[in-house]
Amino acid sequence: MTDKNLKGLIFDIQGYSVHDGSGCRTLVFLSGCPLRCRWCSNPEGQLLRQRLLHRESKCVHKYYRCVDACPHDAIRMMDGESPPVEFDRSFCDSCDTMDCSSACLNEALRISGRYYTVDELMRILLRDQGFWGSNGGVTFGGGEPLLQAEFLLAALKKCQESYMHTALETCAHAPTETLLEALNFTEMLFIDLKHIDPDAHLAGTGVTNNLILENIRAVASSVWNGRLIIRVTIVPGYNDTMENLSQTAEFISKAKLKEVNLLPFHRLGQSKYQQLGLEYEFANASPPSGDEMSKYQGIFENAGLKCYVGYDIPF
């Protein structure tokens, strides 16, 4: 397939970001992920397909054009109840038309995810390029961007041809050769490491970490001369034990890597679960305190690593 016909599913494009690479950046979120992290902040990007989001606050309790527009009879009115309509999500997540969203006049229903050609994406990035400054660029994340490898590689090549600084955020659960090929067109890499124990990783994300650890070692031992930062989101009750973090620091140090970024868990994606009709398991979890994050930081620093907390990363 030529670049002109190649399309990628993107669920968000954010400009003016200063947290995911050097300078001011544009973030491109590609849909689809092989992991199912229980605390995921972007659940609308987990599936490699468009998703229907329902915002109850915008649902006018009078006209329900969506009910008649649905070709699957998957929406029914719930008189006097909240939310006022109920969706059979088994149909919504396999619907190719989502006629209900265009029938809604109040924007209570919207589709997460749009298909872009590489040229369509590049028009947006070239527009933003003038606002990045000398240190800015584009960061591809998700979801898991390597899941749409063909589109990602084509886009990265175009970015390089346009003298754009490129960064990649990945869970690294992808074929090693695909990841290494992407690095040919990538200058900065963030790899998320959820848990060092394979069984705990499986319990929290749905997959083991064997391939992820293998890929971290592969990048560390490759001839790639870009900057790799391992990211660890501190999730209360899951990976915040001294044993796990000490073993994680030991693994990173043995791989001869130098930098770690610790991020505190947050609940900013909670409303998306409601809009998708999903239960949010971490609704009552509290982010780690500043003192706790400092304690965790000390574990990595004692292992001889540079450890940044939050988004305070020197670029």
Image (cartoon, rainbow, N blue to C red):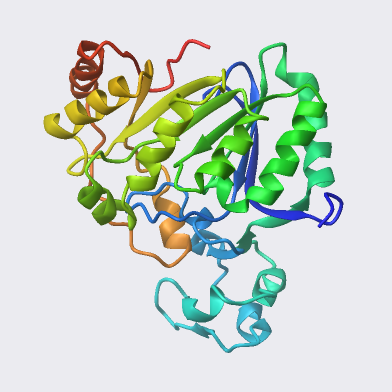
Taking the image as shown, residue 157 lies to the left or right of residue 92, namely right
Residue 153 to residue 299: above or below: below
Marks counted in the figure total: 0
Residue 150, position as x, y percentages in the image: 69, 50
Residue 282 visible in rendering: no
Q: Find residue 24 and report its image quarter.
A: top right
| Residue closest to the eye, 8 or 209 | 209
Q: Quadrant of the N terminus?
A: bottom right
Query: Residue shown at 21%/49% (left/top)?
Result: 200
| Residue closest to the eye, 311 or 195 | 195
Taking the image as shown, residue 285 lies to the left or right of residue 60, namely left
Query: Residue shown at 39%/46% (left/top)?
Result: 211
Query: Residue shown at 48%/61% (left/top)?
Result: 275
Q: Find residue 95 and report its image quarter.
A: bottom right
Residue 54, position as x, y percentages in the image: 53, 65
Residue 271, position as x, y percentages in the image: 43, 53
Taking the image as shown, residue 267 lies to the left or right of residue 167, namely left
Residue 5 to residue 109: above or below: above
Residue 104, position as x, y percentages in the image: 67, 70
Residue 223 to residue 314: above or below: below
